[in-house]
Amino acid sequence: MLEQKENRVEKISLANWTQVIKPPALRSIHSIISRPGILSFALGQPASDLFPVEKLSKAAAKLLAINSSGLQYELPSQRLKSQIVELMALRGVACEKEQIFLTAGAQQAMALLARLLLNNSGQVLTEEVTYEGLYMVISPYLPNIWTVSTDLESGMNIEAIEQLLQTGARPAFIYSITDGHNPLGISMRSDKRVRLVEIARQYRIPIIEDDAYGFVYYESASEPPLRALDEEWVLYVGSFSKILAPGLRVGWIVAPEELISKLSFIKQAIDIDVSTLSQQIISTFLDEGFLPDHLVKLREGYKLRRDAMLEALDKYFPKEARWRRPTNGIFIWIELPDRVDTNELFRIAVERENVAFIPGHVFSINESDYPTHCMRLNFSNCPAEQIEEGIIRLARVLDSFPAGR
Ligand SMILES: Cc1ncc(COP(=O)(O)O)c(C=O)c1O
């Protein structure tokens, strides 16, 4: 029976690009780490215990008691767009309601922008180590991917971008995570922000700026994003996933007004519109003025977890390991001694110590060797009191590596 099914599947001929993609690593790791008892620093999930459940459910109940419009097809909420304009002002970005386009999260925003900008076999320029969602977005176009290195203090190598452009690279866009980089945990230095935008203008290359973590900061407010420096060449991507709840699936693009109708065409073809109910719930939450307090709580909670992880790393990890203190976002990137292959380390850590992380190679968009001795640790979705235990377990695996195979 199973054999018959497999034969049937073989007869369906799939689009060419499906033959060359690598399987999404995070999804397969997800199934491994869902095992009971596992202590996970793997996924980039927000803290479930910090979701403002009561306030969101009150907002939903209130809305549904008034009328059923949240269950109907509706035009995108103008009220929510105005509220996003106010939110962007807190990031130092001046924009108009007409420049806001609502999406199902940052991931869809990236997919829509890629659809808008990238031709089949076109070019994309990004960092060697970056968010793996970009790979998924661009793979169907079978693109030529240019990469530059990232300095772990100051961010993307801007000189290398310029060199690539000088020698003829013409990417459809540059993808940049300016603050709280996933997976590297860094934020771009301000002089690099200015230079990157100058280059984009000079060579007329749009930048997709992924700001999923711009509001998630721990010391002082983040520097203004690239979009604050240019409104023509920077296409800004924001999201409520990391500041409210990813299950609502609402994000946004800030783009020049003339691009909005084209984005709307693409989005309607895919899923018509963002969930009306989610838009209304978020808008009511913002109207009630709940966001500022929630963000204070979130930042305090995450800072506690970040500091617990940094302290435990200092105490238990080998002296040759290197990491930095992230000012934004939810990740710590660790460079281990070269001899440590973190794929192998992951297997042993899960099997022997019931502890998980993401091996660095997952984030290598062009399969470079650099991150094979690196790991990404997430600190947002693990209670502070369990963090030390998790790091002790990881340090034990490292101590015996590779002898403990
Ligand atoms: C850098 C980055 N961009 C985009 C996303 C996708 O976020 P969303 O839930 O808003 O689609 C994530 C999620 O982890 C992310 O880390």
Image (spheres, rainbow, N blue to C red):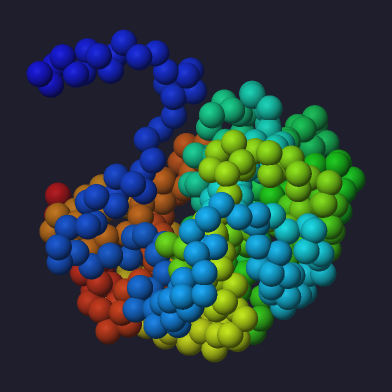
Q: Looking at the picture, tell me which residue is in the foreground, 201 or 348.
A: 201
**Residue 83 position (above or below residue 403):** below
- Residue at 51%, 84% in the rendered image: 294
Name which quarter of the figure residue 7 lies in: top left
- Residue at 32%, 74% in the rendered image: 382
**Residue 186 position (above or below residue 264):** below
Of all residues shown, which one is farthest toward the right? 202
Q: Looking at the picture, tell me which residue is in the foreground, 99 or 28.
A: 99
- Left or right: residue 98 compared with residue 20: right
Q: Looking at the picture, tell me which residue is in the foreground, 374 or 277.
A: 277
Q: Quadrant of the N terminus?
A: top left
Q: Residue 57 placed where, x, y %?
A: 41, 77
Of all residues shown, which one is farthest toward the left? 1
- Residue at 68%, 39% in the rendered image: 265
Name which quarter of the figure residue 313 lies in: bottom left
Q: Residue 245 placed where, x, y %?
A: 46, 68
Name which quarter of the figure residue 9 lies in: top left
> In this orientation, does residue 308 appear?
yes
- Left or right: residue 209 compared with residue 21: right
Q: Looking at the picture, tell me which residue is in the foreground, 313 or 22.
A: 22
Q: How many marks?
A: 0
- Left or right: residue 319 compared with residue 291: left
**Residue 117 position (above or below residue 396):** above
Q: Residue 240 placed where, x, y %?
A: 55, 67
Q: Residue 132 placed where, x, y %?
A: 48, 47
> In this orientation, does residue 158 appear?
no
- Residue at 53%, 43% in the rendered image: 271
